[in-house]
Image: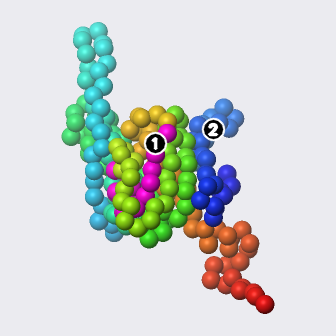
Amino acid sequence: MALSLLSPREHVRVDLNSKRDGFKVAKRPISRIDVTELALNEKLVYINRVSKVVKGGKRLSFSALMVVGDGNGHVGVGVGKANEVPLAISKAGTIAKKNLIKVRLAGNTIPHEILVKLGAAKVLLKPASPGTGLIAGGSVRAVVEAVGIKDILTKSLGSSNKVNVAKATILALSQLRDPETELARRRGVPKGQEAVTGG
């Protein structure tokens, strides 16, 4: 899907539920980042207890939502499921490290506004001036803190499901582009070689 940049009012809309030939099409990037070189911090966002009724009674299991990031542009989200809480948390951390992405930042904020839809979750991210702080809550706040953003305006417009909101935030951050680089690419001019003309 083509991205529209440079105008603060233009949004990028991405829907991961699109289907092709009857199959869901996954558009998330596959991580190729070396985790051993990063100083990652883990943050547990949510633990959900799931109860399944079976013939002998109730069977309990747990799912954990974990966010990892180095505070310098790298962030990942993982969901782990197990019959015990510590094992679910461990799985979530491992999965989050496998799903790391590199986010393009503009100083302490993001380069442009973006609106992303994933399932029923819809997340809006807007750049903010220095000193604004993190205007975010829940899963969105955990993700933007982990990536190292200091000033941002956010709004969750759809479902409040913590897992889907966190994944939508990650998708939005992965869709960010540098306006100058994108313009140069569209014009076919390598970055840094743009000719300046004037009378």
Among numbered discs 1 and 2, the one appearing first in the sequence: 2
Q: Is residue 195 shown left or right of residue 41?
A: right
Q: Assign a secondary structure to mark 2.
A: loop
Q: Position of residue 21 (x, y in %)?
A: 69, 35
- Give the crowd class for mark 2: few <14, some 14-19, many >=20 residues within 10 Å: some
Q: Position of residue 27 (x, y in %)?
A: 57, 48
Looking at the image, can residue 91 be seen?
Answer: no
Q: Amino acid at mark 2?
A: Ser
Q: Please tell me how many numbered marks the rendered image carries.
A: 2
**Residue tagged 1:** 156
- Name the residue located 26 percent from the left edge and 20 percent from the top edge: 59
Give the CA separation, mark 1 to mark 2: 21 Å
Q: How is the image coloured?
A: rainbow
Label 1 sits on what residue type?
Ser
Name of the residue lying farthest toward the right: 199
Q: Which mark is residue 64?
A: none
Nearer to the camera, 156 or 17:
156
Residue 149 within the segment the image draws in magenta: yes
Residue on which the image places disc 2: 18
Is disc 1 placed on a helix, strand or loop? strand
Left or right relative to 146: residue 33? right
Residue at position x 38%, y 52% in the image = 135
Q: Quadrant of the C terminus?
A: bottom right
| Residue 78 is covered by the magenta coloring | no
Question: Considering only vertical position in the picture, is 97 above or below 50?
Answer: below
Q: Nearer the viewer, mark 1 or mark 2?
A: 1
Q: Position of residue 147 (x, y in %)?
A: 38, 60
Part of the protein shown in magenta? 142-157
Tell me the quarter of the picture where residue 150 sits.
Answer: bottom left
